[in-house]
Structure formats: C-alpha cells, structure tokens
Image (spheres, helix red, strand yellow):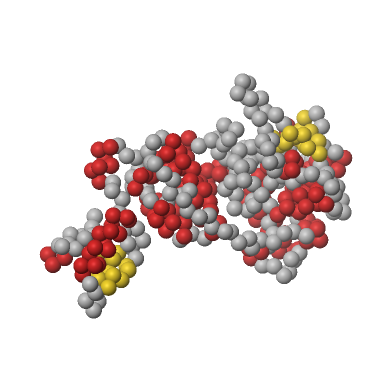
C-alpha cells in the first residue's frame, strides 16, 4: 500500500513528487521509473492525472461490482484448458514455454483483464529480447482473443502491437561440418543425426519414435508442431501433422543399426551413465532420451569436432539445423520434402467428426545419406 501523502503534498495526484531545484517528477506506476515533469506545478499535476488515467487500472470497487476477472486468474484458466488443434493436451515442453511467458506478465496478475491496455503491452514487449517478445506476444494474443469470445474485453491490445523482427544468429550446417560432427558423436546420437537427415523430422519427433510406430513398412510420425519453438523458423501452425514415411533400404539400414542389446521401446535410446534401470519418474522409460540432452550432447560434438572454427556462441548450428540441411538436399535431389517435413500449405491431416479417424500422409525418403556408412 502506498505511503500516505504529507500535509504539504495533499493536493498532489498519486505518483507525482517534488524533484530537485523546484521541479516535479512522475513515478511510473508499473516500471517504478521517475520522469521529469518540469518546474510548473499546475502543468505537472495536469500531466500526472492524465498519466494516472492511462496507466493505473481501474480495478477497485467497480471491478468487484461487475465481477471482472483478473489477468492472473484468466491466464491460468486459459493454460489449463488449452489444447492442440487435434484436441490432444499440450506437450510438457509447450506448457513449460507458455508458463515462462506468463511469468513475464506476472506484474499484471492482480489487474482486471479489461484494464490492460496497448501502452502496457507495448512496454512489456519492448523490454524483452526479440525472440522472447515474439513468444510472449503470441501467447497474449491468444489469451485476449479468448477473453473477447467470452465477452470480458472488447479488443485485443496484443494484436495491435507490431511484431518484432528476430535476427537469426545461428548458421546453417554444411555437409562437411555435419559429417565431422557425426564422426565424433556417440552411436545413439549418430543414429539420431542419420534419421534426421533422411526424414527431415524435428528433434522432439525423432526422440519420440518407437518401434511400435513401424507398421506395414511405414514409420508413423505424429509430429509435435508448435509455434513456440524459438529454434524452428519453418513452422507457422500449431497442432500435429500425421506423416507415414515409407521405409526404403537406406532408412532400414539406419533402423537396423539402432537395434542393439538394450531393450527399449524407443528407436533412439541410450543407457544413462551411472545408473541402469533406476527409474526416472519424468521419463516413460529409463532408456528415453530427453530433448535438452540431445541438444547438449550435439553441442559437445560440434565443439569437439571443431567443424565450424569460424563460428562461436549462438552462431553454432544446433541439432535442429539438420532439418534445414535435409530439406535443402531433398529439394536439390528434385524431391519434394513438403509432406515429409509437414509443411503442406493445405491441411495435411483431417480428423473426422465421427470416429476421429486420423488420415496419415504418405511420404517417401528422397535422399541417401551423404555420409560414409559405419
């Protein structure tokens, strides 16, 4: 609660204070920063009142009487009820990303939803790095769109903001560079690289592949397509693409190499160091490889191989960039990677209202591995 005004300051509006040298200053109610208002008291008071009207949400008794919900309550409800376009729950990775974005908006949690205005949203988004700003803006647009549909607000302040431009620092892989990385990688990672090259699939889809997904000569992939992966510059839709990849001789050779003396439901798997079958409660199976572990181990291999000596830090291409190289090679070979990668311009999947039947999109591997086989 704000400290009561002294007697000599009783006539001042909230957030207006005396500065040095007989000047006035205004304290921003959201950021806490002070802004000079000049020496004219009357003008400073007038400006402070206008700023308060813009910046201080009118939540008090009016909000209580009309039953307005606050931003924190509504956003948590939004997240709890949000589903992918195919009706399935959000993946844990997507939930984690959404929670991070909501944490950046925590200053609004106790504010009435309708009191959050364009200026406030712009201030928040401008204070964030470009990639983070884009993620947060996307989430806020969804939240306010839902609020409009519920009749809680009349407009969407996030939609009125201008999307920031993300400057991509990460470079692409070269064939020579990826070959060098592959040569110093552990076998499970080498297998993952090869599957990524042949199928163009994302990191999360590759580590989720199971032997049970292979049926009648096809590898079935229910793609985890989300808009909130900061590494993925290709995807613009949220939901799942259902791709059925025909297993040719080249892909079969890689799958055969993935079979070892470890019994695992996952095609890409590993035995954790220091423990064997000690159950990790966050994993479906003790041999399951986590997405972040793939990225960390791949970065280790990038540095160990010295594949890109001219690059450093964020410039170093990640595991995800294998996807871009694979798509490039498919196109160069005269093969369309659109269905294989899940980038069709029209809907790739249809889930019928009666029976919820999934329609799989058949795709062929269009290239051979450019590496020397082990």
Does 32 sit above or below residue 114? below
Q: Looking at the image, which residue sits at the far bottom?
A: 21
Q: Quadrant of residue 256?
A: top right
Q: Quadrant of the N terminus?
A: bottom left
Can the viewer see residue 217?
yes
Q: Nearer the viewer, residue 91 or 353?
A: 353
> Where is residue 75 shown, x and y percent of the image?
43, 42
Q: Nearer the viewer, residue 116 or 310?
A: 116
Tell me where residue 4 appears, x and y as whole percent: 18, 59
Residue at (60, 49) in percent of width and height: 229
Is residue 266 shown to the viewer in this render? Answer: no
- What residue sits 66% from the left and 25% below the top? 357
Tell which of 326 and 304 is nearer to you.
326
Report the number of numbered marks. 0
Q: Position of residue 355 (x, y in %)?
A: 63, 21
Q: Position of residue 23 (x, y in %)?
A: 24, 74
Residue 297 quadrant: bottom right
């Amino acid at each position: 609660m704000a400290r009561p005004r002294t007697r000599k300051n009783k006539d001042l509006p909230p957030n207006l204070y005396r500065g040095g040298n007989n000047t006035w200053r205004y304290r921003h109610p959201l950021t806490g920063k002070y802004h000079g208002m000049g020496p004219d008291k009357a003008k400073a008071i007038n400006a402070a009142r206008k700023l308060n009207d813009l910046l201080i949400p009118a939540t008090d008794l009016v909000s209580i009487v009309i039953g307005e919900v606050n931003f924190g309550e509504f956003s948590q409800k939004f997240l709890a009820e949000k589903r992918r376009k195919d009706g399935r729950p959000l993946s844990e990775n997507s939930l984690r990303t959404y929670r991070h974005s909501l944490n950046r908006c925590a200053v609004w949690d106790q504010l009435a939803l309708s009191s959050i205005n364009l200026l406030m949203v712009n201030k928040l988004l401008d204070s964030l790095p470009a990639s983070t700003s884009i993620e947060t803006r996307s989430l806020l647009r969804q939240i306010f769109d839902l609020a409009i549909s519920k009749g809680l607000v009349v407009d969407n302040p996030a939609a009125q903001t201008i999307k920031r431009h993300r400057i991509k620092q990460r470079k692409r892989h070269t064939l020579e560079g990826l070959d060098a990385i592959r040569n110093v990688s552990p076998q499970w990672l080498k297998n993952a690289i090869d599957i990524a090259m042949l199928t163009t699939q994302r990191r999360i889809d590759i580590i989720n592949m199971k032997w049970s997904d292979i049926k009648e000569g096809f590898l079935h992939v229910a793609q985890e397509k989300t808009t909130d992966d900061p590494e993925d510059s290709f995807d613009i839709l949220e939901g799942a693409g259902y791709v059925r990849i025909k297993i040719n001789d080249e892909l079969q050779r890689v799958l055969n190499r993935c079979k070892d003396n470890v019994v695992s439901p996952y095609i890409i798997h590993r035995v954790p160091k220091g423990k064997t079958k000690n159950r990790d409660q966050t994993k479906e199976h003790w041999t399951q490889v986590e997405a972040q572990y793939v990225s960390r181990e791949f970065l280790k291999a990038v540095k160990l191989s010295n594949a890109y000596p001219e690059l450093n830090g964020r410039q170093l291409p990640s595991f995800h960039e294998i996807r871009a190289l694979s798509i490039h090679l498919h196109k160069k070979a005269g093969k369309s990677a659109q269905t294989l990668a899940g980038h069709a311009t029209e809907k790739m999947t249809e889930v019928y209202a009666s029976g919820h039947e999934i329609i799989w999109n058949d795709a062929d591997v269009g290239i051979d591995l450019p590496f020397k086989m082990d």
